[in-house]
Image (cartoon, grey):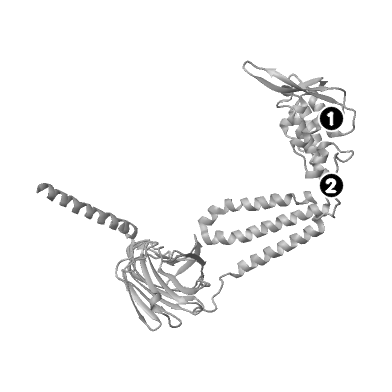
Amino acid sequence: MKQKILVEIFAIFMCFMFLISNQSLAVTSTSEYTIQSYNINMIVNEDNTFDITERITAYFNVPKHGIFRKIPLKNSITRLDGTKSNNRAKISNISVNENYTTSNENGYKVIKIGDSNKTLTGSHTYTIKYNYNIGKDPLKEADELYYNLIGNEWDTNINNVSFTIKMPKSFDKSGLGFSSGNVGSTNSSNVTYNVNGNTITGNTTNTLYAGQALTVRLTLPEGYFVGASSNIDIFSIFVIVLCVAFVLIADRLWAKYGKDDEVIETVEFYPPEGYNSAEVGFLYNGSVDTKAVISLLIYLANQGYLKIEETEETGLFSKSKGFKITKLKEYSGNNECEKLFFNGLFKNSSDGTLNMQRAKEIMQEAKNNGEKISFKDAIELAMETGETKQSVTASDLYDKFYTTLNRIKSKMNSKENKHKIFESTSSGKSKWLILMIIAIFILITVKPVLEYGESGIAMLPFALIFPRNWIYSVNWWPNWC
């Protein structure tokens, strides 16, 4: 008997704690103020816009300047049959019976109501009016009225909710329904309503806690709403027109300056006469990389200046393949890059004595020739001696030969060389394309950042990835001219 009593006491205690924990969440979020009454008067127009008047009576438990009213600029609809749709809204003609300011933050139109120089306690009533344009109806087979009379943006409890909805013409009330509670709830037991002609009136029977909403759903025949707008504002239209114009301009620039004359295809088994392998790579790609420069090794071997041999190095537990490059004769050509490559292979470094004056001279010479050279490379070159080796291996070239490769790449990729193979008109037009891409990016980015506030700013680094890739692509445009 005692055990049964203890079990019953424990069960009552757990129920009590459960109720207290649920209520504590609401009290925590509503301790500063609560809403004593919330009345919505909604006039639905034939073009699917709503003229809304909200009368909100708030009770401030502590001194506060006022309230925030957040109205969503984007709506996500999930219907009873599982279908979903999204729409963007336009809010206009806002008026409030108190001082207020508006801003766009995280997808909401935020109305900040109150006076920064004045605090309120006790009961205070606010009247908010605005036009809500929800745009065209997303359904094809029917029209619908789907609207959050009270959204889930409130951070306090809402009591005594009442509403009046005036429809523009008659409707079948069997398609009418309400739901209240947390997001995704389909519970309608807390809502009572009445239909009188084209007017719907009703109220909630329970308190709406912080984060809970009240939604009206009304299925209407197709064509009920007439003349609904697409909600594309003037700025968006301007951006679209500008983007199309830029595409047309880019196409004309390409047709006039970027497109080559038709070339009759020929079969060639050898590079153009008078050009080495690195130069052919430069002509084809518009620049040279390390692989293209290293190809000079095979080219010089074919010219009889050097010999390449495969070697085998034996370690303690394994064998590895290596190579040996042997000088057969001194370079006698007049190609500066070939000479640099050949001498760089067989150069002999000093014993570590650094001639800073020579390093400065090398950097100045490179600057005068329009080349780019790092201070580290200049030091490496300054430590070279006039002596040369007869043969070198991989270990001789390791962490040394790169300075020679960098000098050759810098010489071949100079602006002077590029102007020799590219049409100046073609190269210059890529700058205009880059400016157009930047302009489009700014135009399509600034509005979301302003509308979504901190969230928009947080997404900005990801958005920068796309124009970076576009600009990179445009930089290569003249290379195919």
Along the line of sight, which residue is nearer the eye, 12 or 242? Answer: 12
Q: Position of residue 368 (x, y in %)?
A: 82, 38
Q: What is the three-letter code of the residue carrying label 2?
A: Ile
Residue under the image location 75 percent in, 38 percent down: 289
Q: Residues within 10 Å of mark 1 (few under 14, many from 20)?
A: some
Q: Reading the chain from its start, which is encountered first: label 2 or label 1?
A: 1
Q: Position of residue 164 (x, y in %)?
A: 38, 77
Circles 2, 1 touching at the beta carbon (< 8 Å): no
Q: What is the three-letter code of the residue carrying label 1?
A: Leu
Q: Secondary structure at mark 2?
A: helix
Residue 30, placed above or below residue 44: above
As drawn, is 447 to the left or to the right of 179?
right
Q: Single out the residue that lies furthest toward the front.
A: 267
Residue 35, placed above or below residue 48: above
Q: Position of residue 234 (x, y in %)?
A: 61, 70
Q: Secondary structure at mark 1?
A: helix
- Which label lies toward us, 2 or 1? 1
Q: Single out the residue that lies furthest toward the top.
A: 316
Mark pair 2, 1: CA separation: 24 Å
Q: Which mark is residue 421?
A: 2
Residue 363 visible in the displayed image? no
Residue under the image location 41 percent in, 82 percent down: 198
